Image (cartoon, rainbow, N blue to C red):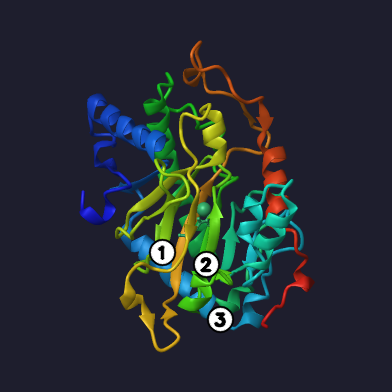
Amino acid sequence: MTAETSSVPIVDFAGWSANTSNEQRKEVANQLVEACRNVGFVYIINHNVAPNRLAEAFGWSKKLFDLELKQKMLAPHPEGYTVHRGYSWPGLEKVSNAMGDEEDEDLTKNLRQVSDVKESYEIGSESNRDQPNQWLPEHVLPGFRSFMTDFYWECHGAAETILSAMALGIGLSNENHFKPSHPGHNNQLRLLHYPPVPAAKIESQSATRMGAHSDWGSITMLFQDDCGGLQIENPHKPGEFIDVPPLKDAIVMNVGDLMMRWSNDSLKSTVHRVTLPPRQDRFTGDERMTRARYSIPYFVSPEGQSVIECLPSCADEKRPVKYKPIVWDDYRLMRASMQYETKPEETAVGA
Ligand SMILES: O=C(O)CCC(=O)C(=O)O
Ligand SMILES: [Fe+2]
């Protein structure tokens, strides 16, 4: 482990394959779950998303965001929060919203005034009828749709492996425990672009790249470019944030709120954010413009009707069940309504 990555553990999935022994697999599973218990974030190396495919995905993402706004607006995020697909222009999504305590109106109002300086494009399974993909006309970016639909399922393959290791590490008797509830049609592939921004805007908190939040689903797999800026809340010192520096081709995996709930809080869904890159060579000119950041999170979630109740190995006499069972769709819509409140015409497209 290098000094740069000392806070977030690295787990090598080379030890988890059809050719490795049960002991080797168990070791990988234990390391993974240990990291999920202590930190909630882990770097995964030697996973099954090929580095050349990852490079291609970042290449497509850049091509997409390089298009003119009016072209990107040919596939807009639908109004409201029930369908989370297509292009979200800067200012549409305010992650900070999700952190406001509903009862603390002043806090929530203040957070809403800070806009996230980012644009994103969400893709799901082509078979998910509740969440129809919003594609650009093919001639605008030929090949994009075909690449992204394949890449979506390549990421799902990696997610299945991680969930199997997690099941084993948690102590479930069947390493395929999560397979039936995670057929892959409820995942979300997200392309994210944080355009250059003057450092002072972020320092004065008049803008954020992505405000502090936790993810909602089972697990998230994040691919980040070499810009930097991702931070997690220090699990041992609440309120303090630590860097998660880029590690080439690694998956940064984190536990989502749902998995935390499912595991009776034994796995941690850690708060994270994107802020200024720590390296000063990322700034240019008098305004100290911060260079652009591209990242690709892949959110892994169960089927909408899955009932989330405490996993069998996560409760006993000393650790009573903490949460009532909940249907994933109900929980997801409640979270989405907090994040996507603004109607598109209320935000300044192209301003
Ligand atoms: O861009 C990043 O590195 C983080 C993205 C993220 O946390 C999210 O989309 O939930
Ligand atoms: Fe996140």
User: Badge 2: few (under 14), some or many (20 or more) residues near its Cα, within 10 Å?
Assistant: many
Q: Marks 3 and 1, how far apart in space?
A: 25 Å
5 lies above or below 289 = above
- Measured as percent of width and height from the top left, residue 107 is found at 68, 55
Q: Nearer the viewer, residue 14 or 89?
A: 89
Residue 143 visible, this angle: no
Q: Is the CB of the residue bearing disc 1 within 8 angstroms of ligand 1?
A: yes
Asked whether, in this view, residue 45 is left or right of residue 124, the answer is left
Instruction: Tell me, yes or no, if residue 305 can be seen here.
Output: yes
Disc marking residue 67: 3
Identify residue type, mark 1: Gly
Q: Residue at x 71, y 77 (%)?
A: 348
> Where's residue 53, x and y in %?
37, 61
Residue tagged by mark 1?
A: 229
Answer with mark 3 or mark 2, whichever residue precedes in sequence.
3
Q: Which mark is residue 327?
A: none
Q: Quadrant of the C terminus?
A: bottom right
- Name the residue nearer the viewer: 115 or 150: 115
Q: Is mark 2 within 8 Å of ligand 1?
A: yes
As helix, strand or loop, the secondary structure at mark 1 comes to loop
Number of numbered tags placed on the structure image: 3
Callout 2–callout 1 Cβ contact below 8 Å: yes
Left or right of 32 on screen, residue 106: right
Residue of label 2: 209
